[in-house]
Amino acid sequence: MKKVLLLLCSCFVIGMVTAQERAADKWIWGPSIGWQYQSGNFLKASGWGLFAPNDRQYIKIDAGANFTWMRDQTTVIPELGLTYYLSNKLIFPFIKAEATPYTITPKVGIGLLSIIDLGLGYGFSMGTKDDFKPIKGLTGSVSLNIPLNFHLR
C-alpha cells in the first residue's frame, strides 16, 4: 500500500510541475458523485482536479470516500484515484487506478467530456477490513463529475 500511495503522490507532483510549467494550463476542479459495484454496492463521493498536460489529453486526480451498508453496518472507505483521459473529443477513453487501504483497482472506460464516466475493472485485495468481507474482483462504476470552474483552453 505504501508503494501505491508513493506512486500516486509522485504522479500528483509530476502533474503539478507539468501544469505549472505551462502557463496556458489551468486546473478544472469540482465534486464527483457515483456508484460502484465491487463485492457490493458503494456510493462514491470525492473532490477532483483535472489538468491538460498537452493539447489532446487530460489527467484527473481525485480523493474521496466510498460509503456502503454491508453486514448490518455502515462503512466508509477512503480512496485515491488517478485518471488518464487519452483523447479530448466528445468521448474521452480513459485508464484509471484507484487505491483504498484494502484494494488496488485498475480500470478502463469512457467519459462523456469527462463529466460522466463509465468504468470497468478488477480489484486486487490488499487486505480485509475488520468485521467486513473482502473487497475484490470485477467492478463496474458510473460517476458524475461536476466542474465548478469550467473554462476553454
Image (cartoon, rainbow, N blue to C red):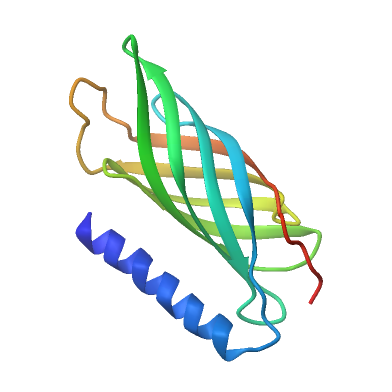
Locate the C terminus and report the quarter of the image it occupies.
bottom right
Identify the image quadrant of residue 77: top left
Q: Where is residue 9 shown, x and y percent of the image?
A: 35, 68
Query: Which residue is rendered at x = 25% and y = 22% of the image?
Result: 132
| Residue drawn at point x = 62 percent, y = 89 percent | 22
Indicate the quadrant where residue 144 lies: top right
Closer to the camera, 102 or 118? 102
Q: Taking 14 as reference, is 108 left or right?
A: right
Q: Quadrant of the N terminus?
A: bottom left
15 and 122: which is toward the camera: 15
Q: Is residue 30 left or right of residue 140?
A: right
Residue 52, can we see it?
Answer: yes
Q: Is residue 108 placed above or below 56 in the rendered structure?
A: above
Decide which of 2, 39 is in the foreground and name it.
2
Depicted 144 relative to depicted 83: above or below: above
Residue for point 56% across, 37% down: 141
Q: Position of residue 52 (x, y in %)?
A: 64, 75
37 and 144: which is toward the camera: 144
Report the residue at 61% width, 47% height from top: 31
- 115 left or right, relative to 8: right
Q: Is residue 85 visible?
A: no
Residue 43 horizontal side relative to residue 125, left or right: right
Q: Report the label total.
A: 0
Q: Residue 6's x, y, as percent?
A: 28, 66
Quarter of the rendering containing residue 14: bottom left
Residue projecting furthest to the top: 72
**136 relative to 63, above or below:** above
Would you place residue 104 above or below residue 131 in this image? Answer: below
Q: Where is residue 92 drawn, in percent x and y?
A: 70, 59
